[in-house]
Image (cartoon, grey):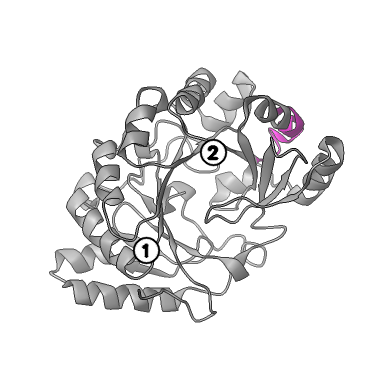
């Protein structure tokens, strides 16, 4: 099988694909209140286009697909799309990032369709903080979605917490909460994408990591998956916490992923503007050979690293426009 290896020797085998830019929340670090820069549905890739493109990526060695948004569960017939992607030769893992507000009624169908892993966003256990950070009073829906995921047999379920000024004092409590429920916790540094995200208050996770390691007796561990987290766990293996630190300890040298927006634009780095428009090529009549060549050329454009620290004002697009 062909492999996608960029000019820095990194093997690219993980695609994060946004199936919609719509969301039922308004998280300030992702899609602030009043945001109106949505793509027209006519610009979204159709399921046929998605299946074709994912199949071509898979033929070149793309093994892992993560479905993101916006909120991916808002895309109509998302279960059917999962089934189509799961049937593609070469795809070994389909995961889903969700805010879980719609998950309670869909978890079982998603698992049967082929989703193997869930990442659920949960930034606080305080109802008032959830309403402030996420823009809606949805804590009960998120917790119900997490329980539905557990009941459907997803294990482990990863809980993603973006750490910022509003919730930094709650990290230890969420660690203990995840320990009791058997969830994997992943703490994520706030990325400065858009002015609203920058105003939420960046928190360096290195001191947090040291404190948690001492308080809970955590040791270095590893966890399977294609993501960038560095993990600590309890010696008995019953709890794991990951740290995603794009600012304080970036992982660009081992980056194995690219992102595609709902309208078919491939972003080669979350912190740069390099991109390739595949929707335009497909709708202009590009052959599979044309698209395969374009994929290889795109991977060769992938930059060495982001510039969040050197140029924090460089990006003006929001996270929701890029796809998780």
Separation of marks 1 and 2 at Cα, in angstroms: 24 Å
Q: Is residue 88 magenta?
A: no
**Residue 237's x, y, as percent?**
70, 40
Left or right, residue 176 beside residue 12: right
Residue drawn 66% across the image and 46% down it: 242
Residue drawn 33% across the image and 35% down it: 112
The mark closer to the camera, 1 or 2, is: 1
| Corner quadrant of residue 183 | top right
Q: Which residue is mark 1?
A: 266
Look at the picture and state if 284 lies above or below 28.
below
Circle 2: element type: loop
Most distant residue in the right direction: 214
Q: Quadrant of the N terminus?
A: bottom left
Look at the picture and state if 47 lies above or below 110.
below
Q: Which mark is residue 28?
A: 2
What residue range appears in magenta? 163-173
Most distant residue in the front direction: 236
Q: Nearer the viewer, residue 128 or 142?
A: 142
**Residue 218's x, y, as percent?**
79, 42
Look at the picture and state if 25 lies above or below 20.
above
Circle 1: element type: strand
Left or right, residue 24 beside residue 119: left
| Corner quadrant of residue 286 | bottom left
Visible residue check, residue 116: yes
Q: Nearer the viewer, residue 211 or 264?
A: 211
Most distant residue in the left direction: 285
Q: Residues within 10 Å of mark 1 (few under 14, many from 20)?
A: many
Q: Nearer the viewer, residue 31 or 95?
A: 95
Q: Nearer the viewer, residue 106 or 302?
A: 106
Residue drawn 24% across the image and 36% down it: 77
């Amino acid at each position: 099988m062909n492999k996608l290896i960029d000019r820095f020797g990194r093997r690219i085998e993980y695609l994060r694909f946004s199936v919609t830019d719509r969301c039922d929340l308004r998280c300030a670090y992702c899609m602030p209140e009043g945001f109106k820069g949505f793509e027209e549905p006519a610009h979204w890739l159709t399921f046929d286009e998605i299946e074709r493109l994912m199949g071509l990526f898979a033929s070149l060695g793309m093994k892992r697909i993560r479905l993101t948004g916006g909120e991916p569960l808002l895309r109509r017939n998302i279960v059917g799309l999962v089934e189509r992607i799961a049937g593609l030769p070469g795809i070994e893992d389909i995961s889903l990032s969700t805010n879980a507000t719609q998950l309670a009624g869909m978890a079982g169908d998603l698992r049967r369709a082929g989703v193997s892993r869930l990442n659920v966003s949960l930034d606080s256990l305080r109802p008032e903080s959830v309403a402030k950070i996420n823009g809606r009073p949805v804590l009960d829906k998120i917790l119900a979605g997490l329980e539905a995921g557990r009941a459907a047999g997803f294990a482990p379920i990863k809980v993603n917490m973006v750490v910022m000024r509003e919730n930094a004092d709650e990290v230890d409590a969420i660690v203990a909460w995840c320990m009791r429920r058997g969830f994997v916790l992943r703490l994520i540094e706030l990325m400065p994408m858009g002015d609203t995200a920058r105003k939420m208050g960046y928190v360096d996770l290195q001191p947090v990591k040291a404190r948690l390691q001492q308080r809970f007796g955590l040791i270095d561990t590893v966890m399977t998956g294609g993501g960038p987290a560095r993990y600590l766990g309890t010696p008995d293996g019953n709890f794991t916490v990951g740290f995603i630190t794009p600012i304080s300890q970036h992982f660009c040298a081992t980056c194995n992923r690219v992102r595609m927006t709902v309208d078919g634009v491939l972003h080669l780095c979350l912190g740069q503007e390099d991109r390739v428009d595949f929707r335009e090529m497909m709708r202009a009549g590009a052959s599979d050979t044309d698209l395969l060549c374009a994929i290889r050329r795109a991977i060769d454009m992938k930059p060495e690293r982001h510039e969040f620290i050197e140029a924090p004002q460089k990006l003006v697009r929001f996270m929701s426009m890029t796809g998780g």
